[in-house]
Amino acid sequence: MKQLTLGDLSIDVDTAAPGAIHLRWRGRSNNQNPATTLQPFLELQLAHARQRGVRVEMHFEELTYFNSSTIAVLLHGIQEAHARTVPLVLHYDRRLRWQAHNFEALRVLQSTDDLLRLDGGAGEINPTPRRS
């Protein structure tokens, strides 16, 4: 699957980069029940990453909004990545207040999971070693 479209949200999949599957989130994730579509999509990408022995890098820099239902799906995805031992990097734009607020709240998960890394753009927050 090269792209997922769910309402105003699109996620492009790039598997060409060595060592990673890149998921580029664009638009607005405002669907009231994104789990029915988004959760299986993320689980599929994690399964592919596990098979290939690569990390998953999610890019949120071009996302203009996500609701609490999307955050719940992301939390599930982080748990799934941990269960599958797939390294996960979340890229966001910390200059955007709403992104900084939401992603910095995920730092608590980073401290318990050496597979999770948050990258706010101009510098990493609590970087952990990369695994590929």
Image: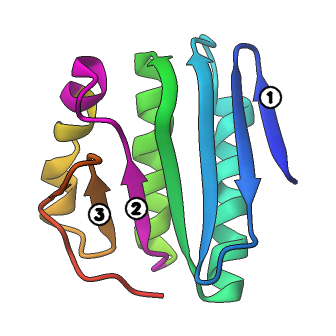
Give the Cα separation between the discs numbered 1 and 3. Answer: 26 Å
Residue sitting nearer the eye, 27 or 78: 27
Say which amino acid is labelled 1.
Answer: Thr
Mark 3 touches mark 2? (CB < 8 Å): yes
Q: Mark 3 sits on what residue?
A: 117
Q: Is residue 99 magenta?
A: yes
Give the left or right position of residue 15, taking residue 129 as reference.
right
Give the class, few, some or many, for how many residues have Cα within 10 Å of label 2's Cα (few <14, many ≥20).
many
Q: Residue at left 39%, top 52%?
A: 90
Query: Which sits earlier in the primary sequence, circle 1 or circle 3?
Result: 1
Where the N terminus falls, by quadrant?
bottom right
Say which amino acid is labelled 3.
Answer: Arg
Residue sitting nearer the eye, 5 or 70: 5
Q: Is residue 93 magenta?
A: yes
Q: Element under label 2? A: strand
Residue 87 picture quarter: bottom left
* Residue range corresponding to the magenta coloring: 85-101
Q: Mark 2 sits on what residue?
A: 89
Say which amino acid is labelled 2.
Answer: Val
Query: Which sits earlier in the primary sequence, circle 3 or circle 2?
Result: 2
Q: Which numbered tag is attached to residue 14?
A: none
Look at the picture and state if 51 lies above or below 125: below
Look at the picture and state if 51 lies above or below 128: below
Mark 1 touches mark 2? (CB < 8 Å): no
Q: Residue at left 58%, top 19%?
A: 29
Query: Which sits earlier in the primary sequence, circle 1 or circle 2?
Result: 1
